[in-house]
Image (tube, grey):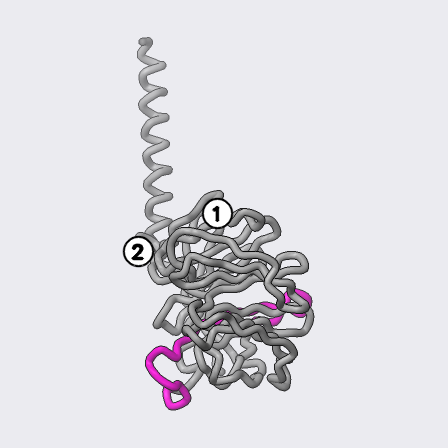
Amino acid sequence: MPIVATYRTRRLVQTLAIAASFLDVGFAVAAPVMGYKIVAKYPHSTENYTEGFFYLDGLFYEGTGLNGHSAIVVTQPKTGKTERRRDMPSQYFGEGIVDWGPNLIEWTWRSHVGFVLDRFSLKIVRQFHYDGEGWGMTRTANELVTSDGTAILRFRNPDTFDETHHIVVRDGQKVIEQLNELEYIKGDIYANVWHTDRIARISPQDGHVIAWIDLAGLLPASQRINNESVLNGIAYDVKKDHLFVTGKQWPTVFEIKVTRQNSPR
């Protein structure tokens, strides 16, 4: 090989190595932490063990858990009035829910059974089956996105529920486990992390955490029923750009604005 070609080859290898090192350093940097400001408060039933939560056409849709208490509940935000309700059979522990066309899709924790329901009557249209545990669920324009309590988010075909691909969620080099309730907002995935007061904003392309929202202090400990009354529930009003959060058996749904960490509340 000519000397010039060898030199160029070595330079190319060095350039690629330097570029790779910059990528590694960038990926290793922890995501920034954001704060919040409370914009409004809405009533929420302390009977609702929130596992799925979204906003659509002026209503909150909520999937609740616990065997014998699981239900899909549709409420008016300002009053908390129940517009529609479907109690699930007692053997099922309800989990994440999402809208898809005229239907709702809900799955369950460990039963490996999911349901497609008519969104307006809440009648069950059909059932489906899957492997693994069911936790959170949201949607993009074309796919469902689900969590199972690990660091993996799975993208699924909404018609078959088959996995098309998945991502592993990391903050820098740290793998983020116990991802729970999900919401898709402006092209990113927002995820509750079980037993924390933080929401991760995640890139759907490679799973890296873009930023954290620290919601510490949002609901005083004195208003939590027990240690399982944790933050879990994210909803987004696309038309008005409003972000809502709540938790399991919390008395309140909070509309919040994401701020810099040190912003006053």
- Disc 1 target residue: 205
Farthest residue toward the bottom?
222
Residue 232 as seen in the image, left or right of residue 176? right
Quadrant into which the N terminus falls: top left
Q: Please name whichever residue, 39 or 122, is drawn nearer the observer in this view of the structure.
A: 122
**Cβ atoms at labels 1 and 2 below 8 Å apart:** no
Q: Please name whichever residue, 180 or 129, is drawn nearer the observer in this view of the structure.
A: 129
In the rendered image, residue 210, in percent from the top left (x then y), is placed at 45, 57
The numbered mark, 1 or 2, whose residue comes first in the sequence reads 2
* Residue at x 47%, y 85% (from the top left corner): 46
SS at circle 2:
strand
User: At label 2, which amino acid type do we have?
Assistant: Lys
User: At label 1, which amino acid type do we have?
Assistant: Gln
Q: Is residue 92 magenta?
A: no
Q: Please name whichever residue, 234 or 200, is drawn nearer the observer in this view of the structure.
A: 234
In the rendered image, residue 101, in percent from the top left (x then y), is placed at 66, 57
Relative to 11, say whether 187 is above or below.
below
In the rendered image, residue 11, in percent from the top left (x then y), is placed at 34, 25
